[in-house]
Amino acid sequence: MDNIRLNDMINKEVVSAIKYVSRMKPEFLLSEIRDYIKGDLSTREIFNIIHPMLFDMGLKAVHEKNDYRIIRTEPKKPLELNNEEIQRNEVFFKSPRVPRRLERVIEQYIEKKTFKKWEDNAVLEKIRKAIVSQKEDYWKEGKKRKVTYETGYSVLGYLAYQFPVYFVQFQHILYGMAKDGLLKTRMKILDIGTGPGVVPLSIIDLMNRLDDCEAMIYSLELYDENIEAYNAIVTQYAGIKSKAEIEPPIKADIKNIKDVNIPENLDLIVFSNVLNEIRGFGIEQKADIVRHLSGHLNDDGNIVIIEPADKLNSIEFRKLSIALKNMGMGIYSPCSFIWCTGCDPKECWSFEQKEDIKPTRLMSKLAECDEPYRYMNTDIKYSYAIIRKDQLTRVKYRVPPKAKFARLSKLEQHTGKRINIVASLMSGDLGDKKYHLYKICDGTAKKPVYAILPPHNTTPENEYIKTAAYGEVLELYNVLVRYNKENDSYNIMISKPSRVEPVVRPDEDEMED
């Protein structure tokens, strides 16, 4: 019998023994398994065999001296937030920031890499140069654009400038998913292109504000410098206080994702600011990467894709979302297809906007120079989508038959007239002191459409648009249609006689499909 077949038989025997004993006892020492198997395996060898399978078996291992205590966990179920959890998170998001403990872990990593104090002037100047270089590369077009993290200072620049914002913005998305009931008490998560571990650190931080949850986090990363930073920063921060078990990053190029050994039964897959950085791949190729990975996702799992809010990347991202929809996947949010039609996002520039974060100590120190604006990055704007295989959507509202609303695709017929429309709010306030301006969409428009509310026309009947949530569906009554020739778009003018209301009111049940 060859070694491969022999090892396979031993592995099956160990797994069978673990399953048997775990059904009999809620917890036990791993060394006890040796009494149930024929082979002469050490406790460590048994652990190496069963460790990748523990989470799926509903078990967890706690190290005890030269042994491991195996504990049966509660079955995973939908995560329901209690009032205390909601209060903790609302307090955090009112004034979001990187926790001081995590700031210190990052500062210590900088000192380990540079052999100098993190606030040393020479270190700060090299980080500044890395930030400037990264921003210059980011804004290049075509083949000239190359975003990489192959040097130590490129990673330190990322940690100083991009990391704080990305860290908080993913928590916004994850918390929104928790409120929507999309998360579970036990989750198996894969972060694609993890970098120095932004998403795992975000998950750890959010879960520390929740009572009943735990996660097994896997990640993929290409660059050795990022993997080194991940192993130093994420591992240390998870060791301080964490409900997540962190696996070492898998070194892989997502352009060759089909050759990578991906974990099965995933509850969440995350692409955070990574797909836009793939060089030489078009929309269909990127969509194929996401579709391939969806095969490792549980039927009720989620894929979160986040991209920058700048016009070029945001528009390309919306095309990617629709490409995935055309491949048979569903968009849970923020898009809503209230007319049950397709969407043509040729110029769909849509993004979410949240409260600014507080700058980290490192960021503030970098800004102590002649051009401080170059190194301050505190505003949170991002484009995102939650993709699912089961076609579940956040907004279940569909325009009722014979409803007296005009489709945005028909605005040319109504130019200069007052009409009623129903549409999703797809931006924060893009206006200025002269007027409030919001992008709106109903899934039918061929040209960009904006709702405009001058401050002097604001009334209790129409001001709801100023506080409505991103992606929320609104009914706009008695609004004036104007064509903007300069921008080839339509403006929906909200005036004093106009009325703006949510389609789902707090005292009503949400409409079903």
Image (cartoon, helix red, strand yellow):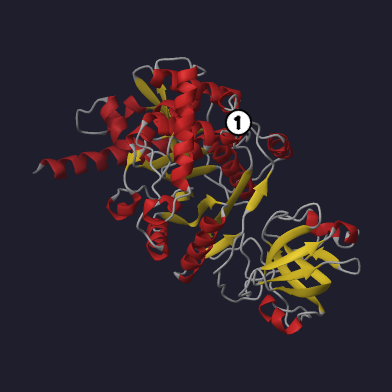
Q: Nearer the viewer, residue 157 or 477?
A: 157
- Residue 253, placed above or below residue 202: below
Residue farthest along the left direction in this orientation: 1
Q: In this view, does 58 lie to the left or right of 451?
A: left
Point out residue 282 in the picture as x, y percentages from the top left corner.
39, 62
Q: Residues within 10 Å of mark 1 (few under 14, many from 20)?
A: few
Residue located 76% across and 56% down the image: 468
Q: Quadrant of residue 250?
A: top left
Q: In this view, does 231 lie to the left or right of 415?
A: left
According to the picture, the residue beneath numbered tag 1 turns out to be 372
Residue located 71% across and 79% down the image: 411
Q: Name the image quarter holding the N terminus.
A: top left
Q: In which quarter of the image is residue 410?
A: bottom right
What amino acid type is highlighted by mark number 1?
A: Pro
Point out residue 108 in the picture as x, y percentages from the top left corner.
47, 19
Q: In this view, does 497 lie to the left or right of 84?
A: right
Q: Which of 65 and 372 is in front in this view?
A: 372
Q: Name the image quarter holding the C terminus.
A: bottom right
Point out residue 58 in the picture as x, y percentages from the top left corner.
45, 41
